Image (tube, rainbow, N blue to C red):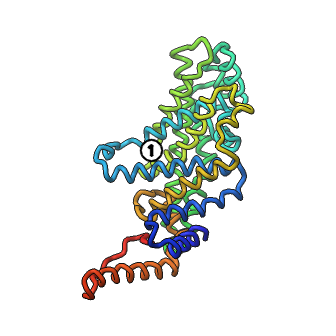
Amino acid sequence: SLFHGGRGLLTEKWAHRLSPRLRTFLAGMCASTAAFFETKRIRRDLAVFALARAAHSMFLSTQKRSPMLQGLPHGDTFVFSLATAQIMWSYAVRRDLLPDEYFKFILRCGPITSDMLFEVQRRSENGLEALSAAWFNHDCGSIPLKIANTFTHTAKTVVPVYMVVYGAPSIAFHPMRVLRSPVSSVVRVVSNALRSATMLSTLCGSFMAMVFAHRLWLKPAREPRLAYWIIGFFSGLAVMLEPKKRRAELALFAFPRMMDSLFHALLPSRLAGRHRAAFRVGNGSEVGVFAICSAVVLSHYRHEPDCVTGWLNTTLKHLLADTAWDKDMREFNMRQVNQLHVDSNGGETPTTISSPRGSC
């Protein structure tokens, strides 16, 4: 409502002074101030996710104009692996770098239990003797069995989650399609959920397998820290099990978590307390970041819709569907353009000009 209202006001008052893209940008900024009603934790998450989406939209827009950027076939896989490396390193060594809810989700379906993580973090922080492979599988007694248990435990945990992730959008955005062909819709949701669960289970299982390989073959004297980052990077290659469009979505989901964790990891510990306020622009600065990034995304959606991909494109398509006011304004703009052609042609019949999407 704020987006449509703000864009309508800007069009009525400054239609001749502002370009359509700038009007959309300013309307998006106005609409995004609604984030003030959320808690600070949610505002921060919204800001980092909007930042990633804005960067992706600008990259796709630039890629269309620059042939040099069109030869990156597995860029999404590389970004996801980098993000997985930082997230899994934080999970194993610095749990304070991850939000509590996100850490609990990884802990619930991850390869290492909370007791093991506590001991790993204690030894890595103090430079104590490295834990042996036998210690990691003391509850199973067999390394292959431990890896298999990790795989099955993760699959059982995330299958219901992915059923909701894939099922809810189908019901919300395409209810008639579900009613017309319920069997095929259910099969599609189940197959997608099983594929994504297999990917995440493979990621966790390979992470555990590489931890065992590192302990058995390299036999580190002290509890390592960098090893968890490297292991996380290679385990992130499990995303290749997903189709390319899904890989891009997963990369855009994991990338903001990586940047948030990396920022706080690089922040000196002496600034972690009261001095961290020096890095803040002001109270509610995350709303400003969210507003600018959301405005960038909305501007691309209205004028370059192919630069906004995945579920975000589908969501915006339903939330920002053209209203009757949009159609009236398009007709009004077309009449203005045609009148200008009449005046310039000395009263001749105007040439019909098709209006591009989002001209309002």
Tell me if residue 164 can be seen.
yes
Where residue 156 appears, as percent x and y from the top left, is 62, 46
Q: Quadrant of the C terminus?
A: bottom left
Q: Residue at x 47, y 62 (%)?
A: 22
Q: Is residue 187 left or right of residue 110?
A: left
Number of marks: 1
- Going by the picture, which residue comes out furthest to the right? 274
Q: Quadrant of the N terminus?
A: bottom right
Answer with the quarter of the image where residue 208 lies.
top right
Q: Residue at x 66, y 41 (%)?
A: 280
Where residue 213 appears, as percent x and y from the top left, is 52, 22
Residue 344 versus residue 146: which sits nearer the camera? 344
Image vertical order of residue 133 relative to residue 191, above or below: above
Where residue 174 appears, as percent x and y from the top left, is 52, 70
Answer with the quarter of the image where residue 92 lies.
top right
- Going by the picture, which residue comes out furthest to the top? 221
Image vertical order of residue 127 relative to residue 155, above or below: above
Q: Is residue 96 left or right of residue 216?
A: right
Mark 1 falls on what kind of element? helix
Image vertical order of residue 328 relative to residue 128, above or below: below
Q: Disc 1 designates what residue?
A: 241
Where residue 223 appears, as percent x and y from the top left, is 62, 17
Q: Residue at x 60, y 49 (%)?
A: 47
Residue 193 versus residue 349: which sits nearer the camera? 349
Residue 124 versus residue 204: which sits nearer the camera? 124
Bin the neighbour count of mark 1 within 10 Å (Cα to Cα): few under 14, some 14-19, many 20 and up.
some
Q: Residue at x 39, y 52 (%)?
A: 60
Tell me if residue 159 can be seen.
no
Of the residues shown, which amino acid type is indicated by label 1?
A: Leu
